[in-house]
């Protein structure tokens, strides 16, 4: 098969990824620090993320589905993998055959695992106030878990990125559950939960977005490094006369005779029209290039009037610092990463 290069690439920094994990591990108050690598490592490539973090010392990884787990086989030596969505009726064969633990989150899943798990250890999710996945506390303490070998008992914080009383309530509820339900380890904190302090760490933390360059709370600002750097190749440079417009809807009018670089990227690649809000730009060498006109499905345009050297085939680096881009366009930092499309070549450095 002929290898055809893509006009889109993600430069991915393994050094930043590992540095972020090490900072989160240092904030975990002596607890083990794991890694959520669901959604393909938040869009960056789960297998590569697992490889780099395992080499750095991470031993606990989490995906959402059994298909994601199967795609990571064989696992690096010495690491464990858990499936956060538990065991559905269609997951039984995978649950029986893969060296992976389910995170059981309902009475039905517990029954299913008792039949399929053959006594193997599992994880369990307890709902302490999010009302998403997990056993209710009265279910968990009412005998439903009797006889199970629970490796890690989890819960999940609903409002950890805010200074909310719900965090305190969930911490108290999980602390009480810890006293009532035996497990080898206990885990509550996600990325934002790590920043809440030592009381939330328990035995294992499960950061996600902060590994990949997201800042979940102010405490992480200045410590978390950008990991993903999207770049698009220039398809064409064209002259636009003063008074002419660019793009659908004629939303941008040239205030002077201008040069416009049209690049191979658009909303089909996860760069949405909301990205074109005030201040959006690309960078070429040291030059900042304002985005002009509407984002199209496969094309975006930048004003390069003051940079005469840019030509067809050059690479433009998109402004994609997650916290600031999120504020500008209104998308969450999670959406910014996981929305980056399959046409990007993922290049780890």
Image: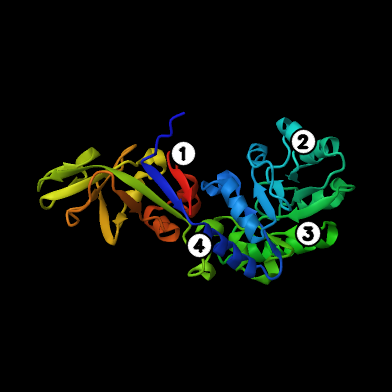
Q: Which residue is mark 3?
A: 185
Q: Between residues 160 and 70, which one lies in front from this camera angle?
A: 70
Q: CA distance from mark 1 to mark 2?
A: 29 Å
Name the residue carrying label 4: 215
Where residue 217 appears, as percent x and y from the top left, is 53, 65
Query: Does residue 294 appear anywhere in the picture?
Result: no
Mark 2 vs 3, N-terminal side: 2
Give the alpha-carbon distance from disc 3 to disc 1, as whole Å: 37 Å
Q: CA distance from mark 1 to mark 4?
A: 24 Å
Could you tell me how far apart the alpha carbons at marks 4 and 3 are, in whole angstroms?
Answer: 27 Å
Task: Residue at 35%, 53% (x, y): give it.
Answer: 317
Instruction: Give the residue number, with chain letter if any, for mark 2.
Output: 97
Asked if the residue under mark 3 is in contact with the one under mark 4, i.e. CB atoms within 8 Å, the reply is no
Question: For the residues carrying marks 1 and 4, which lies nearer the camera in this image?
Answer: 1
Mark 1, residues whose alpha carbon is within 10 Å: few (<14), some, or many (≥20)?
A: few
Kindly state the secondary structure of the residue where label 3 is placed: strand
Which of disc 1 and disc 3 is earlier in sequence? Answer: 3
Residue 72 picture quarter: top right
Are discs 2 and 4 less than 8 Å apart at CB? Answer: no
* Residue 279, x across and y down, in percent: 30, 58
Residue 177 lies, in percent from the top left, at 79, 59
Residue 211 appears in the figure: yes
Q: Residue at x 44, y 57 (%)?
A: 322
Asked if residue 338 lies left or right of residue 174, the reply is: left
335 lies left or right of 8? right
Residue found 12% across the figure and 52% down from its top: 255
Q: Position of residue 7 (x, y in %)?
A: 36, 41
| Label 3 Cα neighbours within 10 Å, binned few <14 / some 14-19 / many ≥20 | some
């Amino acid at each position: 098969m002929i290898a055809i290069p893509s006009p889109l690439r993600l430069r991915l920094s393994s050094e930043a990824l590992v540095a972020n994990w090490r900072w989160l591990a240092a904030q975990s108050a002596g607890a083990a620090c794991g890694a959520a690598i669901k959604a393909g490592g938040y869009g960056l490539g789960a297998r590569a993320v697992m490889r780099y973090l395992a080499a750095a010392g991470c031993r606990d990884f989490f995906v959402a589905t059994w298909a994601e787990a199967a795609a990571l086989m064989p696992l690096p030596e010495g690491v464990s993998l858990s499936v956060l969505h538990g065991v559905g009726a269609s997951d039984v064969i995978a649950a029986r055959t893969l060296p992976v633990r389910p995170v059981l989150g309902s009475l039905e899943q517990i029954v299913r695992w008792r039949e399929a798990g053959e006594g193997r250890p599992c994880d369990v999710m307890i709902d302490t106030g999010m009302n998403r996945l997990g056993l209710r506390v009265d279910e968990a303490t009412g005998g439903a878990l009797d006889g199970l070998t629970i490796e890690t008992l989890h819960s999940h914080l609903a409002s950890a990125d805010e200074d909310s009383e719900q965090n305190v309530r969930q911490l108290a509820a999980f602390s009480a559950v810890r006293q009532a339900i035996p497990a080898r380890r206990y885990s509550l904190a996600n990325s934002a939960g790590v920043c809440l302090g030592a009381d939330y760490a328990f035995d294992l933390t499960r950061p996600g977005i902060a590994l990949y360059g997201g800042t979940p709370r102010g405490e992480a600002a200045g410590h978390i490094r950008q990991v993903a750097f999207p770049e698009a190749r220039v398809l064409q440079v064209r002259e636009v006369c003063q008074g002419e417009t660019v793009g659908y809807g004629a939303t941008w009018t040239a205030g002077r005779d201008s040069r416009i670089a049209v690049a191979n990227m658009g909303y089909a690649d996860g760069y949405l029209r909301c990205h074109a809000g005030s201040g959006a730009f690309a960078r070429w060498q040291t030059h900042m290039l304002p985005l002009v006109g509407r984002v199209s499905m496969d094309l975006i345009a930048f004003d390069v009037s003051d940079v005469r050297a840019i030509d067809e085939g050059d690479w433009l680096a998109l402004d994609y610092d997650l916290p600031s881009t999120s504020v500008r366009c209104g998308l969450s930092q999670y959406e910014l990463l996981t929305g980056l499309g399959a046409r990007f070549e993922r290049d780890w450095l």
